[in-house]
Image (cartoon, rainbow, N blue to C red):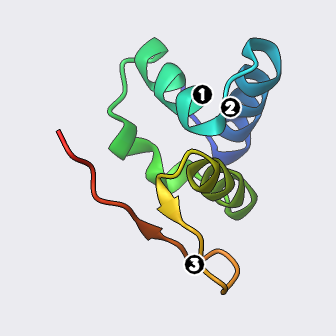
Amino acid sequence: MIITKKRFTAAIEELVADKNMNYIDAIVVFCEQHYLDPQSVKHLITPPLKEKIEADATNLNFLKPNTKRGKGTLTKFET
């Protein structure tokens, strides 16, 4: 099955609504279910979906908020 941007976005939105998860987790779950590398779906992310992912990342403190809309910076992860 060929995954289009429209189908991908619909699947992610469905996971977010049905499973009560954030967009980042929904993408990871989708990739696991379809045996895909999360990096391989970056071309399927639409601008509205990207904004929702950035909002989740900011809320989860993965991105530092910036005064310019949609322009955050990734925080360094300590392992």
* Pointer 1 or 2: first along the chain: 2
Residue 24 percent coordinates (x, y) = 55, 38
Q: Upstream in the sequence, badge 3 or badge 2?
A: 2
Residue ID for mark 3: 71
The amino acid at mark 1 is Ala
Q: Position of residue 73 (x, y in %)?
A: 44, 71
Q: Are marks 3 and 1 in contact (CB under 8 Å)?
A: no
- Residue 34, x across and y down, in percent: 45, 17
Q: Which residue is mark 1?
A: 26
User: Separation of disc 3 and disc 1 at Cα?
Assistant: 22 Å
Instruction: State which mark lies toward you, 1 or 2.
Output: 1
Q: Quadrant of residue 46?
A: bottom right
Q: Residue at x 21, y 46 (%)?
A: 78
Residue corresponding to mark 2? 12
Q: Label 1, label 2: how many angstroms apart (C-alpha)?
A: 6 Å
Q: What is the residue that sits farthest to the bottom in this orientation?
A: 68
Residue 9, compared with residue 76, is above or below; it is above
Query: Tag 2, which secondary structure?
Result: helix
In the image, what residue type sits under mark 2?
A: Ile
Tell whether label 2 touches label 1 (CB within 8 Å): yes
